[in-house]
Amino acid sequence: MDNPNVEEEVKLRIRHGAFLDLLKRKNIGYSVIGSYSERDLIFDFPDMRLLKNDWLFRVRLENNEIILTFKGRREIFRYSKRRTEIEGTLGSESALKALEKIGIHVSSLPNDLSGIISLLAQKGLRIVVEVVKKRTSLELK
């Protein structure tokens, strides 16, 4: 995972069971291909400058990977939003670029979660939110 890009998304709020019922009613076949957990640590400075600029810096743990993500200011349209996103696994060039977007310049990164949390703390960031999500992947037929 090593991609700087612009993310455009539409998010719908629907309960998982209601979504599966909708697929059945529309005769759309599916199979569950797996479940996984994501743990997101959202960081900011004590003055909340990232939030005030509508930026986000996240460290995500997913499938034994550590992924650093910078999300820029949102452009909101009627049904969607668009924002610059720089995301990369720990050790990648994109992970370094994500840090640079929030003013942190380093030549190399630690290789584990405690190391990246320590680095961010040394630079003045702290965890402001922690979110744990369970995801289920479906394959539509």
Image (cartoon, rainbow, N blue to C red):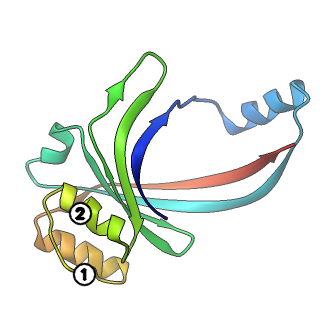
Residue 80, percent from left and from top: 46, 25
3D distance between C-alphas at marks 1 and 2: 11 Å
Q: What residue did someone put label 1 on?
A: 108
Residue, x 46% and y 35% (percent of image)? 8
Indicate the quadrant where residue 16 lies: top right
Residue, x 71% and y 52% (percent of image)? 137
For the view shown, which residue lies furthest in the top direction? 78
The image shows residue 81, relative to residue 115, as above or below, that is above
Residue, x 80% and y 27% (percent of image)? 22
Residue type at numbered disc 1 = Ser
Q: Residues within 10 Å of mark 1 (few under 14, many from 20)?
A: few
Near-viewer residue (102 or 25): 102
For the view shown, which residue lies furthest in the left direction? 47
Residue 37, percent from left and from top: 57, 61
Indicate the quadrant where residue 92 lies: bottom left
Residue type at numbered disc 2 = Leu
Q: Are marks 1 and 2 in contact (CB under 8 Å)?
A: no
Q: What residue did someone put label 2 on?
A: 99
Q: Residues within 10 Å of mark 2 (few under 14, many from 20)?
A: some
